[in-house]
Amino acid sequence: MLNKLVVENLKHRPVRTTLGILAIGLEVTMILTLAGLSRGMLEDSAQRTRGIGADVLVRPPGTSVIGLSTAPISDKMLDFLRKQPHVTFAMGTMVYPLGGVTTITGLNLDEFEKLSGGFSFTAGGPFTGAGDEVIVDEYYARQSGVRMGQRIEILNRQWRVAGIVRSGKLARIVVPLGQLQDLTGDNGKLSQIFLKVDQRENIPVVVQSLKAKLENYPIYSMEEFISLISVDNVPGLKAFIGVVIGVGVVVGFLIVFLSTYTAVLERTREIGILKSLGATPAFVLNLVFRETFILVIAGSLAGIAFSFVTRWAVMTLVPASLSQAIVPDWWPIAMLISLAGAALGALYPGLRAARQDPIEALAYD
Amino acid sequence: MTDRHIIEADDLRKVYRLGDLHVHALRGVELSVRAGEFLCVVGPSGSGKSTLFHILGGLTPPTGGKVRLDGQDLFGLTDSERTHLRRKKVGFVFQRYNLLPTLTASDNIEVARHLAGNGSNGRDPRFEEVLKLLGIHHRLHHKPRSLSGGEQQRVAIARAIVNQPAILLADEPTGNLDSKNSHIVMSLLKELNQYTGQTILVITHDMAVASFAHRVVHMRDGRITEEQVDYLGM
């Protein structure tokens, strides 16, 4: 009977119920979208890094795990690294930002071939040497609607798409290293250097040895580097997620508080009727909390559905840039977060309803 | 009617404070209601009859005096105990019907049954008869907004007696009805009293309503001023 009363109350005020569900849905969407974007970007980055096939990574001094926007390493470092014990090969790349989170990578295809076996082309092939040629991955081609042989503008220059490669290796947009260095005025400079080591067990030896010789350079085994590509290691990201979740809880609290408060006021007389029939304060509080719980469950389901919509919107509005993952493991977390905010929001109006004097409530118009 | 008293009110006083002003709503009311009795409390507006109704129903405590409901000291109980007693022993009928607008007539009755802990124990043949007597058995699946005032009040009566309370308290039950429906509702209360032995106390300002009662008590200025038994030859 209690559940029937709750459901009928919600059905009786469809606009308020729908708005409550939508508002909680938006809160959940906000959390899921942020968590999805963080994970999507990081997983994408980790997958492409894993696909390189290198054993050790040398980064410029002062850089974090995520993000490269400069090329401060001299390419003379390559010769130094190639001469180190157990190092069989070294390849440098240059990464240049194109806006947002999109970057372009300059590399020498022959060297990349030696390091990782090269790209797997689904259309076209390697650079022909004709100049102004670009290779893009399938994801970028699909998202940006780029076709083989088409000319696309990057860095105020027209590039011919020489090849489209399978996603998951190093970068989405690749041009010849020398040409990118010329274009950006970074001749002879690299953003990072990948090393191949003779035997797997020698990787820690090489890392330790290089750390001793290149004190200020962050040097990682690739395994360690990939494990570091997480929310915890992106400066400020964890705090940012925390702030957004906090805002979500506050928004949920305010929405439910306002909605429940007005509902309790609106239903003062009904609460008086229930009390005259012998409803205890606990019964009334239970009623309010059950309504809130249903709103949270429905709102969370709506939020999960909306997160698919935001994923679609991200991919449509900023193609081949941001990558949003669907994060089922965050669904219960987002639901609990919104439930916490909603429970806090329902507490005061619920207690107010529970303490309602039946005579005053029955006289309420 | 028996000699057992369902209600015994002794020296009931109620004072409301409005700022510095003390309003004496009841000034020492003595009243007893016997099991099976149909009693009307009549008085003009401001006579204290609604305050008496609320106190006898356990909805608000008196400032002084005692009320025994079916043998129990109503205000010697905790709020929670009084709430539980009210569920079982008192049925209310209000002037404005006070049905829950979100529920059907049937569910409105069911809520009272649920709150009293009687749950849905299937169909109660006796209660089915009462519903027929009230003439609402075919309107039970309608929500209050699609029922007439008279029908709503009859549903409210059904809700009030579904748990077989010791007393049915009705506050101006015909106040929102036209004369035809007023007569129907009062006749039904009278029939309920006669056929089921339900003890009924009606508060009203309308002497025509009072004509249905065994006994009529007049109130003025917070006091009982007059009592008539078998009013108009009943």
Image (spheres, grey):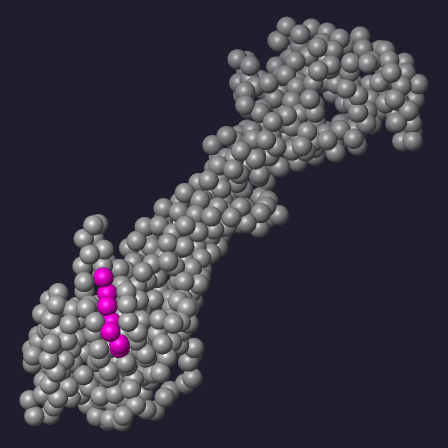
Instruction: Using the rendered image of the protein, determine whether residue B179 is visible from the camera's viewpoint.
Output: yes
State whether residue A311 is above or below residue A117.
Answer: below
The image quadrant of residue A193 is top right
Which residue does the image show at 53% across and 46% down from the upper left? Answer: A337
Q: Is residue A37 above or below residue B31?
A: above
> Which residue is nearer to you in this view: A126 or B229?
B229
Residue A90 on the magenta span: no
If the image is split into quadrants, where does the C terminus of chain B sit?
A: bottom left
Drawn side of residue A359 relative to residue A66, left or right: left
Q: Which of B101 and B3 is in front in this view?
A: B3
Residue A94: percent from left, percent from top: 69, 16
SS assignment for the magenta stretch, majority: strand
Q: How many labels does the image show?
A: 0
Which region is colored magenta?
B9-15
Q: Is residue B198 at least partly visible in the picture?
A: no
Q: Where is residue A54 in the image (x, y as percent from the top left)?
A: 80, 27
What quarter of the picture does the N terminus of chain B occupy? Answer: bottom left
Residue at screen point 86% across, 13% down: A213
Relative to B142, is A134 on the left or the right? right
Name the quadrant containing residue A101.
Answer: top right
Residue B98 to residue A30: above or below: below
A365 is higher (above) or lower (below) than B149: above
**Percent position of residue A220, x then y:** 79, 25
- In percent of the image, x 39 and y 59: which residue is there? A354
Q: In this view, does A86 lie to the left or right of A6?
A: right
Of residues B73 and B1, the one drawn nearer to the viewer in this rendering: B73
Q: Where is residue A49 in the image (x, y as percent from the top left)?
A: 72, 29
* Towards the viewer: A44 or A219: A219
Q: Does the magenta stretch include residue B12?
A: yes
- Whether residue B177 sits left or right of residue A36 in the image: it is left
- Residue at 57% in and 50% down: A332
